[in-house]
Every structure is written in structure tokens, then in C-alpha cells.
């Protein structure tokens, strides 16, 4: 997209952020939808030839020509021609059919062209093309982008595994942890959701006007059309839903959108934690010459990448929520509300891509400030109270929790020295006192 076109785009997805979303055009643009419809129509015709239907005496050498002409070497002029035909038909899938018949004439297949779209309704094409393009966008664009972030987080988790860090529950100092482990939590959460996503099939509806292969069966009752539909849809890498109404019931697609939402929610959590660590000076950020953090305050280096990601993930989730809630609901055999909604499937995924690239950029800029982390630990000796009272419980010491509570709760001046003095007052053996004195905020990090 030209810079001028980007400036005048209504949506920032195709304007300001067009570079971040460019890879999605091959799947979610109008041209891409046309290409995927042509692909389904072409493969369906070939499948009828292979059945074979007795009237289709088509040489197999034509198959490759059809594929190349219609979708492997997709021609933009075909898309424009379809849009031109649509001006007359006011029906997008019928326009695809008419374009295909023109191509059939060019290839000398005039006698076979009435078997284009044979026995089908529009949703056999739409509800096969759409899950196919979503599946391939997921595999080729979305998963690799999430994978880049997971890989980076794994590296950081390993690199930071030995860095002791003050934990915070309710925003208050809590039992120490390790920075690497805290990052690993996000890795495992995302990976678990990806495993669940992997279990959701990309399902297609293929069965004629109301899902019963009525036209197919009346014309050729000798064929098992359900078996044909199953085989054809599987050849595209999809699962055929059966039985259906005129449309796919979208339950699997709704589950997919909900799965993406959960991944996004985890990443929002990640963004907020990194934002907070930056505000606490646990992380600093690499500087880039020429960048400005504030139009008024020259010193600022804002965590803009994590903020940008959080905003876009929120937008994505709002749209995914609508998709997953709306699509499985229709009136009787079908209404048209699914059609206009499905055209927007690429929008939340585009916001996801903007967010994923922002997170990737943000992660590349963070630098651990081990000095600040260590200082924060050393300023919070009260957090070892849990360790001391637990060992005292082990030793049968009376009311150890209450003793440590009286010493530490609300006391901002607990130091190593004050804890040592407290330990010396305890009625326990010297060995236990020595054990207690060895506990430090930096060493009390668990397993």
C-alpha cells in the first residue's frame, strides 16, 4: 500500500499499521476471498470429474491449467472482472461462477461449464473458502508470530532463571521469586492455549441448498453424496460438518475465536507486568537515536510497545467476542447476518498482528536492571518472616505466626539486623537460630 493510500485509509489496520498487517492481505482481503472461492470451485469441479460424473469427459491434463488459471497464478484482472459482473448480478458468488465459465470457454471446456457450481448454494463455497483461508492464515501468519514471542520469552526465562526478585501480591512485597520463573509462567500459559487451539478443527459446510444434497441426489441418486462431501472437504484439509442447515453452524469457528481471545488475554497480562516492571525500574529500555518519549518531557522513555499491544489486543478481543457470540446463531436454515460479519474476520486478527509485533519489539528493547532488583530485595527483609515462622512451626514453637506478625506487620524498618536480634530472643537451639539467620530475601526463592 502506498504511503498516500495509507494516510487516507479509514481503518488504521490498513493505514497506519499497514506494514504490520501486510501478510494478512493474502487471506482476508476481498481479493483473497475471491481467490479462495475460485480455489474451492475449481477443486469441486475436478472432484466431480474424478467421481466421475458420466457427462464429464475431461482430460486430466486440464486440471493443472484450471488450477493455474483460477488460483495458483491468481490474476488481479479476474478479481476486477468478478466485481464488474457483480454490478449486474448483485451476488458475489454468482459472479465467481460466471467468471469461471468465461475461463472454461477460454480453455475449450464450454461443454462442461454448466457443471461449475453444480448443485451448490453460495454457502457451500463461502463456508468452505472462509475456514480454509482462516486455517492457512493461522498456520502461516498467526502461529509463527506467536511462536516468535514464545521463543523470545523462553530465551529470557533461561537467561534470567537465577535472578532473585521480590514478588508482589496485592501490590505488596511478598515471598521472593525468580525473574526467569515469572517469565516461564507466561510461556507455559500460551503454550497450553496453543495446544487447545490445535484440537479445534477448521470445519466446512458442504451439502447443497439446505445441507441435504437435494439437487445432487435428484440428478444422480446412485452416488453417495455424503461420502463425496466428506472426501472433498477433507482433500482441502478441513473437516466437514454434518448434518447442517444451509450454513456452517460455526461452533468450531467460535471455539477458535475464543481460543485466540485466551491467548490475547494472557498477552495483555504479560504487557501489564512488563509495563509495571519498567515503571519499577526492574527493566530499562534500549534507546534509539531520534526517538522521542514525550513532546514536553525530554527525559522520558515510555513503554509504548507494551501499551500499543495492550490496546490492540483489547480491540481484537472485543471483535472476537462478537464473532464467537454471533456466528453460531441464525434464523431457521439461515439468515444473512453471518455474511457481513464473516467479512470482518481479518480485522481482529489484524489487531492481533499489530499487537504481536509490538510485543516482539518491546521485548527486544528491555534490559534487566539487576541492581534495582537486588536493592528492592534488600530493602524488604520482612518477606523472610514466612520462612522463619514456618521453621518455628516445624520446631513446635508456640504461636510462631503471631510472633512474626507482631514483629513485621506494618513495620517498614525491618532489616537483617533487626531480624537477627529477634532470632536471638527465640527459645530454640543454636542450630535452629543459625539456620534462621542464613535465610535472606535473595536466597528464599523456593524451587
Image (cartoon, rainbow, N blue to C red):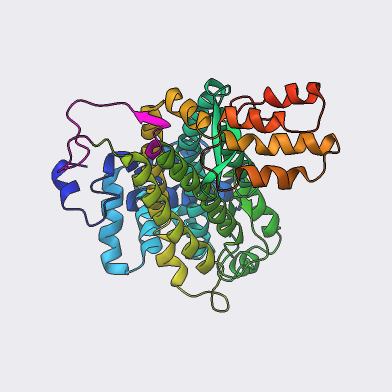
| 47 to 187, vertically: above or below | below
Seen from the viewer's position, the closer of residues 342 and 422 is: 422
Can residue 204 be seen at all in this image of the molecule?
no
Q: Residue furthest bottom?
A: 332
State the image quarter where residue 92 is shown: bottom left
- 84 vs 195, left or right, is left
**Magenta span covers which residues?**
278-299
* Pick the front one: 4 or 321: 321
Quadrant of the rendering where the N terminus is positioned: top left
Query: Viewed as shown, does residue 397 lie left or right of 153?
Result: right
Q: From the viewer's perspective, tell me whether residue 29 is left or right of residue 390.
A: left
Seen at 27% across and 54% down, the residue is 81
Which residue is at a point 45% across and 73% down the rendered structure image?
336
Residue 237 place in picture, x, y as percent: 59, 43
* The residue positioned farthest toward the right in the image shown: 396
Residue 291 within the segment the image draws in magenta: yes
Q: Is residue 40 magenta?
A: no
Residue in the image at 49% along x and 58% along y = 125
Q: Is residue 430 left or right of residue 30?
A: right
Quarter of the image for the C terminus: give it.
top right
How many numbered callouts? 0
- Residue 127 position in % (x across, y down): 52, 59
Please name the predominant secondary structure of the magenta segment in the image.
Answer: loop
Instruction: Residue at the far front: name it.
Output: 425
Tell me residue 249's x, y (percent): 59, 65
Q: Return the x and y of residue 248 as percentages of the image width and height.
A: 57, 63
Q: Nearer the viewer, residue 191 or 339?
A: 191
Relative to 445, say whether 255 is above or below.
below
Q: Nearer the viewer, residue 327 or 31?
A: 327
Q: Tell me, yes or no, if residue 130 can be seen here.
A: yes
Amino acid at each position: 500500500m502506498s504511503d498516500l493510500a495509507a494516510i487516507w485509509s479509514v481503518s488504521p489496520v490498513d493505514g497506519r499499521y499497514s506494514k504490520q498487517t501486510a501478510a494478512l492481505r493474502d487471506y482476508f482481503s476481498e481479493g483473497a476471498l475471491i481467490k479462495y472461492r475460485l480455489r474451492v470451485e475449481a477443486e469441486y469441479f475436478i472432484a466431480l470429474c474424478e467421481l466421475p460424473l458420466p457427462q464429464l469427459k475431461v482430460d486430466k491434463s486440464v486440471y493443472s491449467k484450471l488450477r493455474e488459471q483460477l488460483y495458483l497464478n491468481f490474476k488481479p484482472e479476474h478479481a476486477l472482472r468478478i466485481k464488474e459482473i457483480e454490478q449486474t448480478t448483485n451476488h458475489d458468488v454468482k459472479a465467481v461462477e460466471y467468471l469461471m465459465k468465461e475461463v472454461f470457454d477460454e480453455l475449450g471446456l464450454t461443454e462442461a461449464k454448466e457443471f461449475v457450481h453444480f448443485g451448490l448454494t453460495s454457502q457451500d463455497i463461502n463456508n468452505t473458502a472462509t475456514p480454509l483461508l482462516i486455517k492457512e492464515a493461522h498456520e502461516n501468519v498467526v502461529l509463527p508470530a506467536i511462536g516468535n514471542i514464545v521463543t523470545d520469552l523462553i530465551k529470557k526465562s533461561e537467561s534470567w532463571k537465577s535472578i532473585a526478585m521480590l514478588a508482589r501480591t496485592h501490590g505488596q512485597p511478598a515471598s521472593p521469586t525468580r525473574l526467569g520463573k515469572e517469565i516461564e509462567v507466561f510461556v507455559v500459559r500460551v503454550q497450553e492455549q496453543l495446544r487447545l487451539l490445535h484440537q479445534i478443527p477448521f470445519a466446512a459446510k458442504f451439502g447443497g441448498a439446505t445441507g441435504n444434497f437435494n439437487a445432487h441426489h435428484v440428478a444422480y441418486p446412485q452416488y453417495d453424496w455424503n461420502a463425496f462431501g466428506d472426501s472433498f472437504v477433507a482433500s482441502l484439509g478441513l473437516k466437514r460438518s454434518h448434518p447442517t442447515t444451509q450454513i456452517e453452524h460455526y461452533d468450531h469457528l467460535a471455539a477458535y475465536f475464543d481460543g485466540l481471545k485466551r491467548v490475547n488475554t494472557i498477552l495483555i497480562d504479560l504487557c501489564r507486568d512488563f509495563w509495571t516492571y519498567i515503571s519499577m525500574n526492574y527493566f530499562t529500555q534500549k534507546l534509539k537515536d531520534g526517538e522521542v518519549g514525550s513532546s514536553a518531557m525530554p527525559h522520558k522513555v515510555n513503554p509504548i510497545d507494551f501499551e500499543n499491544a495492550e490496546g490492540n489486543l483489547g480491540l481484537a478481543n472485543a471483535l472476537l467476542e462478537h464473532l464467537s457470540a454471533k456466528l453460531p446463531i441464525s434464523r431457521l436454515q439461515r439468515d444473512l447476518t453471518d455474511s457481513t460479519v464473516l467479512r470482518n474476520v481479518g480485522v481482529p486478527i489484524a489487531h492481533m498482528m499489530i499487537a504481536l509485533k509490538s510485543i516482539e519489539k518491546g521485548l527486544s528493547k528491555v534490559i534487566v536492571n539487576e541492581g534495582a532488583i537486588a536493592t528492592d530485595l534488600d530493602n524488604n527483609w520482612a518477606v523472610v518472616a514466612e520462612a522463619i515462622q514456618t521453621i518455628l512451626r516445624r520446631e513446635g514453637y508456640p504461636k510462631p505466626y503471631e510472633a512474626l506478625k507482631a514483629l513485621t506487620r506494618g513495620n517498614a524498618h525491618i532489616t537483617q539486623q533487626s531480624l537477627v536480634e529477634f532470632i536471638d530472643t527465640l527459645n530454640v537451639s543454636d542450630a535452629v537460630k543459625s539456620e534462621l539467620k542464613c535465610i535472606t530475601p535473595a536466597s528464599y526463592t523456593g524451587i
